[in-house]
Image: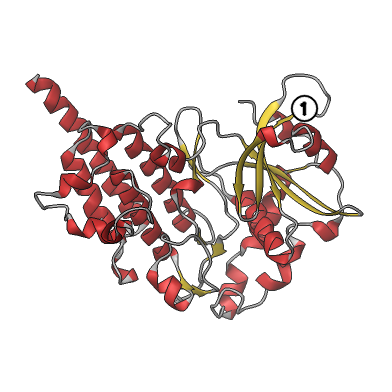
């Protein structure tokens, strides 16, 4: 896919009042905005999200609304590829600026015109995706922001991910079974993307919305984290968390976040543990159509400890025993550590990456051993 031809275009002049930078500048400069007090030294030595975005915003293309409307055939329902609480996503085709050459296939999110909350999430997406650079994070190509006679329009343009989401492949019975090794590679890539958010930037990014539907897959099933509307800049100084109103998807949020509104990178680790069990079991985090004891995934799996004789009973039956039991046990133990009630006792995402690499090694060695026996 040719993603770069449209980025060579010089951004079109646009109303500075609509700039994603200016809209939150005053809030970010507030010393208490992230629930932490900055010292005088930290303010001068540490750049925040607005400063980092200002440095890189030239990499994003500013699209006109007409251009994106044409790219989606007037937001044709037949081109809709997703829908969430804050907008619909369409498959689109962007023409080169000079009209010459191939079109670029993209995904275009059109936010619902539902007021301030939707705009804040649009701002967060533009700013966070505007500064990140990692193969396991979806690439934002540009945006559109228009306040006109026809109302407010907020749109985002991403690289197109043809294989939809991890959720679709795990839980949609009409899709082919996702092979064991592919599952491990996907979750490893997702972990590497999360580790980058936590430790790979000048600022710490709390993702706040890790779930299987936000892990998108490219044509080769490489994973990319998407949907940064709930992301938050992490605490500074010696603070361990930021305080905010709990928001997200039921079943994935860490208990300390739900109960107190305190969120940290360790909250992301909890969410990751939930998805690890989804990978193992092929079950959603909450399934109301199951017996009461089986409706909440993380409660149900506790009946089948990783070292127990009955552990294999939780493994996705669609795998038909085509998996490594040793690796599965390792992943279950990793998930349990991620789901520790005490946030401080959860592993870091760098440690999660290391454990997943060992699980993949276990799977590879198991495959070699099986071939030798046969």
Q: Is residue 101 above or below residue 157?
A: above
Quadrant housing the C terminus: top left
In the rendered image, residue 363, in percent from the top left (x then y), is placed at 21, 35
Q: Can residue 118 be seen in the rendering of this structure?
A: yes
Q: Is residue 74 above or below residue 110?
A: above
Indicate left or right for 319 with 160 as reference. left
In the rendered image, residue 8, in percent from the top left (x then y), is placed at 74, 33
Indicate left or right for 100 with 217 as reference. right
Quadrant in which residue 292 is drawn: bottom left
- The residue at 62%/36% (across/down) is 159
- The residue at 25%/48% (across/down) is 331
Q: Nearer the viewer, residue 275 or 79?
A: 79
Quadrant housing the N terminus: top right
Q: Nearer the viewer, residue 107 or 251?
A: 251
Residue annotated with mark 1 = 95
Q: Is residue 95 above or below residue 190?
A: above
- The residue at 68%/32% (across/down) is 78
Indicate left or right for 189 with 86 as reference. left
In the rendered image, residue 193, in percent from the top left (x then y), is placed at 45, 47
Under tag 1, what secondary structure?
Answer: loop
Quadrant in which residue 89 is drawn: top right
In the rendered image, residue 175, in percent from the top left (x then y), is placed at 42, 31
Q: Sort mark 1 into few (<14), some (14-19) or many (20+) by Cα contacts within 10 Å.
A: some
Q: Is residue 10 above or below residue 116?
A: above
Marks counted in the figure total 1
Q: Can residue 336 be seen in the rendering of this structure?
A: no
């Amino acid at each position: 896919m040719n993603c770069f031809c449209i980025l060579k275009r010089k951004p079109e002049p646009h109303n500075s009042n609509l700039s994603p930078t200016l809209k939150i500048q005053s809030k970010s400069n507030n010393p208490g905005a992230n629930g932490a007090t900055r010292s005088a030294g930290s303010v001068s030595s540490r750049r925040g999200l607005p400063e980092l975005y200002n440095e890189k915003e030239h990499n994003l293309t500013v699209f006109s609304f007409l251009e994106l409307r044409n790219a989606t055939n007037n937001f044709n329902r037949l081109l809709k590829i997703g829908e969430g609480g804050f907008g619909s996503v369409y498959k689109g085709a962007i023409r080169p600026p000079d009209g010459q050459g191939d079109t670029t296939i993209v995904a275009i999110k059109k936010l619902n015109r539902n007021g301030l909350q939707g705009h804040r999430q649009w701002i967060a997406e533009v700013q966070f995706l505007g500064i990140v650079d990692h193969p396991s994070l979806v690439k934002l190509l540009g945006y559109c922001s228009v306040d006109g006679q026809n109302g407010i329009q907020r749109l985002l343009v991403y690289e197109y991910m043809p294989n939809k989401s991890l959720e679709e492949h795990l839980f949609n019975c009409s899709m082919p079974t996702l092979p064991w090794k592919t599952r491990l590679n996907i979750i490893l890539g997702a972990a590497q993307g999360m580790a980058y958010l936590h430790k790979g930037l000048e600022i710490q990014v709390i993702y706040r919305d890790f779930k299987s539907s936000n892990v998108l897959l490219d044509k080769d099933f490489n994973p990319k984290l998407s949907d940064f509307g709930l992301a938050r800049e992490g605490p500074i100084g010696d603070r361990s968390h930021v305080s905010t109103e709990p928001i997200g998807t039921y079943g994935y949020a860490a208990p300390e976040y739900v109960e107190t509104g305190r969120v940290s990178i360790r909250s992301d680790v909890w969410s990751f543990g939930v998805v690890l069990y989804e990978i193992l079991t092929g079950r959603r985090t909450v399934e109301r159509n199951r017996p009461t004891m089986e409706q909440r995934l993380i409660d149900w799996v506790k009946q089948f400890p990783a070292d127990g004789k009955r552990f294999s009973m939780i493994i996705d039956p669609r795998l038909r025993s085509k998996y490594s039991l040793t690796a599965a046990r390792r992943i279950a133990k990793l998930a349990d550590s991620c789901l520790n009630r005490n946030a401080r006792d959860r592993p870091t995402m760098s440690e999660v990456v290391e454990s997943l690499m060992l699980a993949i090694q276990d799977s590879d060695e198991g495959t070699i051993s099986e071939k030798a026996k046969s």
